[in-house]
Image: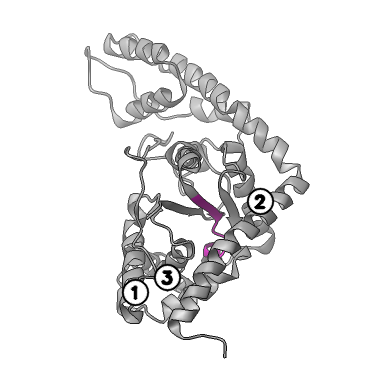
Amino acid sequence: MKEIVVSGSRPTGNLHLGNYLGAVKQFVLMQEKHESYFFVADYHSLTTHPNPKDLHENVKTVLVEYLACGLDPNKTTLYLQSDIPEITELYLFFNMHAYLGELERVPTFKEKAKSQPDNMNAGLLTYPTLMAADILVHKGTHVPVGKDQEQHLEMCRNFARRFNHVYQQEVFPEPIPFNMGNELVKVPSLNGTGKMSKSDDENSCIFLKDSAEAIRKKVMRAVTDTGPTTPNETKPEAVENLFDLMKHVSTQDTVSSFEESYNNMTIRYGDMKKQLAEDMVNYLAPIREKIDAIANDNTYLRHVAEEGKEKARISARRTLDEVRNVIGFRNF
């Protein structure tokens, strides 16, 4: 069986450095070696009832930033989820074979039930079946997923297996996680703890669209401590985070120099932050320039979206024709 990679991103605003290093760079590698489908998951965002103008702008932002980061419409299929009606049809079919109890036991659903009890809509409950439709509409075999999505992928495997069993046909593969053979890169936050996330204060994230000045200000505000007091002291998390960020954007000589100054207790965090900020500005400059250019080219964006729609629908229609026939929806 050939490897088919499928992955999507919700349009929740601008991508940050963590998104780029943790996932999008992997997507760029995947498009070179595999049949791949990458999409903007705009249907999934409807569970939060976004403002229509915000939804449109956020969809455009993700598309622009995917392209700026290196996804090539000539090498992969890049499309909007809402452009593919076969996804919602398959979503309906999977819902007919999903059970209330198993959907209610999903940890992310239970978390939402606690955090937003006034908005427990059916879309949140059936998120796993829509995700399964996203993947299996192309008969995806590999899915790049983070730890928080692993149960959803396991449910996708269950839905594929259940459908095949009910109809006694091997229609769907059982997709597996894809990590390109390496641990998923985790980019630390500037707030001193955890990984970079849009759910935190936006000052703890470096967004791909951030200006050079914005990057400098954010990095200079990054949390540190008062400095080491003994040679070769173990770094606190906030300081380790700065070194981890530097390893992503700076030269090895630069990292080694600051490691040495930390170990001999001569480090000046202000100097380290200035160096990190400049290296980060230089690292992201090519992407930021591409974002600015693509965002102003609506003709190109329309072309990319239409081309992606056409390519994705060929694959999706092929799957749905087979599914409908297996279920019993046939022409007289």
Mark 2 belongs to which amino acid? Lys
Instruction: Measure how far apart labels 3 and 1 are at the Cα level.
Output: 15 Å
Relative image position of residue 256 (x, y in whole percent): 35, 13
Mark 3 belongs to which amino acid? Thr
Relative image position of residue 35 (x, y in whole percent): 49, 49
Span highlighted in magenta in the image: 36-46
The residue at the point 54 percent across, 25 percent down is: 283
Instruction: Let me know if residue 81 appears in the view.
Output: no
First in sequence: mark 2 vs mark 3: 2
Instruction: Measure how far apart labels 1 and 2 are at the Cα level.
Output: 37 Å
Mark 1 belongs to which amino acid? Asn
- Which residue is the site of mark 2? 60
Relative image position of residue 275 (x, y in whole percent): 49, 16
Locate the C terminus by quadrant. Answer: bottom right
Locate the N terminus by quadrant. Answer: bottom left
Q: Is residue 65 above or below residue 218?
A: below
Instruction: Let me know if residue 302 appears in the view.
Output: yes
In the displayed image of the protein, which residue is found farthest to the bottom?
332
- Which residue is the site of mark 3? 129
How does the figure colour the protein chain or chains? one colour
- Secondary-structure class at tag 3: helix
**Going by the image, does 29 lie left or right of 84?**
left
Q: Which mark is residue 164?
A: 1
Q: Is residue 14 above or below residue 176?
A: above
